[in-house]
Image: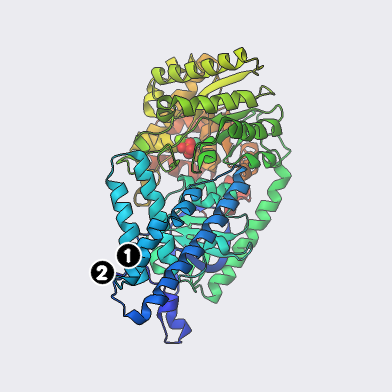
Amino acid sequence: MTISTKNPASETDSGAEAARLTPRTVLVGVPASPGFALGKVFPIINREVSVVEETIPESRVAAEEQLFLKAVSKTANEIAKIKEISESRTGLQDSLIFSTHLMILKDPGLVNGILDQIKKEHKNACWAVHVVLGGYIERFEKIDSPAMRDKATDLRDLYNRLISAMENSGPVVEELAVGEGVVLVAHEFVPSFLMSLKPGQVSALAMDTGGRTSHVAILARSLQIPAVSGLRNIAALVKPDDTILVDGSGGMVIVNPNDDDVRKFHERQEVFERQRRELFTMRRLEPMTRDGKYITLHANIELPSEAEKVTDFGATGIGLYRSEFLFFRKDVPSQEEQEYAYRQILETMDSCPVTIRTLDAGGDKLVSGISVVNEANPFMGWRSIRVCLDREDVFCTQLRAMLLANTKGNLRILLPMISGLNELRRAKAFINKCRDQLVSEGHEIGKVKVGIMIEVPAAVMLVDLLAKEVDFFSIGTNDLIQFTLAVDRTNELITEMFQPHHPAVLSMIYQTVMAAHRQGIPVAVCGEMSSDPLSVLLLVGLGVDELSMTPWSVMATKKIIRSINFEDVRETALTVLQMDDAESVNAFLTKKYAQTISDLGISSLLGNVGEKQN
Ligand code: PEP
Ligand code: MG
């Protein structure tokens, strides 16, 4: 049997501290979330865990039993804490999958089965867990049912936690004090895990996988946690006592930095803080180009509580609330729970528009109780609007909750991943049905606008027809790029191919804008392009009316808009539409605008501007 998760800190007895640490190593990845952090590595083990089989003498049986029982109680405490944090963050009861975990941990069949392996078979505790819990996982995985596969996922998480607890791999993240300043390092993170972190509990994230538009990266930016993704092998490289420097603006980490690295780090961090402070002077200014073209700036949010701060950052509405983040829990939130959350946002924003996207589950956002795990192509699988149309119970519960919460008439319902008229019409029929039902139940329903995400190339091909049947478009460039170029947005091996300025992508955006304007409806962009400076110039030039982004990117984007002339960027956009490839477009834009952008003094807030170090 193999060993793969030994904690190096507990492995050595040489006493030579330096020898236990990773030598200074510079790794370059993707700038997933801007900002800087210097802290101790805290490894999160989420690679497959494997353990050693040992036959133990009778004299060790009691110790191994104790080891297992302690791991059970440590794991139960961990889970109870995550559950509590998660509930306080989302404002919902029974968050995430953790109630089930606690129940499984108390299952006498499971616990006794493991103790029997230790007592009767004389196996070490880790192996006993491996045999018994691993056996359950295997059995559930073989059953061809989404619910059973979900259960296997729950058990696998529990398995990893128990083995980690027994291997003494240090404190669990939930026990870390706020402000401890550790940097979490993992092969990959999932959005629900990030949601369970307390504000200020960790100072940065570094991960092997992912790109800039994965939902973990989006969430890290929203939570203002500096992060570097796509580092490929950092999880295997670092050790728990290592110091690590994370430059989320430049997309680089340095493990065990030297004095010079630390000095440069502090200089950059200072610039970052200063640039961020200076930006606040922008928030009350109009997002207007120098020649008077007004561009609406809205915020993307993932949590209802974020609504409170979006106007402080200068946004005049919410352009995208990713409602699926409310569903990261064991069961589907009830109509009342959803109404409460939506009301919190709609009422906080008063008369400003609030765009709530209907459940966009699937892809890299697996929702327990709904999503199917282990799909061969999750981004193209049973997800998003497809799930909603198949699960009338889930969809109508959400629609009723939204409509009831819309007391101020500022709701815009956004339907994700629409690929044709049939889907749109079916979704609108559900909206009408829910509204009629509520009216017949005596409710007064406020005005509602209905729009669609343009994020599938098929929708662009049909854009004139779609424009006739909706109130607005919102272009989801993260998925539109992914599907147009056939480049998985979360795959770090092909991040270079994820090209927002590819002529095919720009042409899709332009066609969408033209069709919308012919029909007299507005077009927003709510993908990550809307906060990249050079993309902002192009999107404005292509005629986009509204940009929606992470709340704290609004001020920097406003600064960019106020520095440009609409007529000039329009000409630029029309010029680059004729170009052959993204490289030519980028070279042209850089030559023409790099200096203007650099003069704005926002470089460290934007990502991809870090100086490479060796
Ligand atoms: C998009 O696809 O651009 C988008 C905004 O939605 P998400 O990132 O949640 O897929
Ligand atoms: Mg999308």
* Quadrant of the drawing holding the C terminus: bottom left
Residue designated by label 1: 50
Query: Looking at the picture, how far across and down is residue 533, in whole percent?
Result: 55, 42
Q: Which mark is residue 99?
A: none
Residue designated by label 2: 1
Does residue 154 appear anywhere in the picture? yes
Secondary element at tag 2: loop
The amino acid type found where label 2 is placed reads Met
Q: Are marks 1 and 2 in contact (CB under 8 Å)?
A: yes
In percent of the image, x 51 and y 24: which residue is there? 396
Q: Is label 2's Cβ within 8 Å of ligand 1?
A: no
Q: Which is more toward the observer, 586 or 607?
A: 607
The amino acid type found where label 1 is placed reads Ser
Q: Quadrant of residue 306?
A: top right
Q: Is residue 538 above or below residue 404?
A: below
Q: Which is more toward the observer, 131 or 248?
A: 131
Mark 1 Cα shell of 10 Å, populated few (<14), some (14-19), many (≥20): some
Looking at the image, residue 346 sits to the left or right of residue 78; the answer is right
Q: Which is more toward the observer, 203 or 443?
A: 443
Q: Is residue 350 above or below residue 174?
A: above
Pointer 1 or 2: first along the chain: 2
In percent of the image, x 60 and y 55: which residue is there? 198
Q: Is label 1's Cβ within 8 Å of ligand 1?
A: no
Q: Which is more toward the observer, 220 or 426?
A: 426
Query: Looking at the picture, how far across and down is residue 426, in whole percent?
Result: 43, 18
Query: Looking at the picture, how far across and down is residue 51, in whole percent?
Result: 32, 68
Disc 1 from disc 2: Cα separation: 8 Å
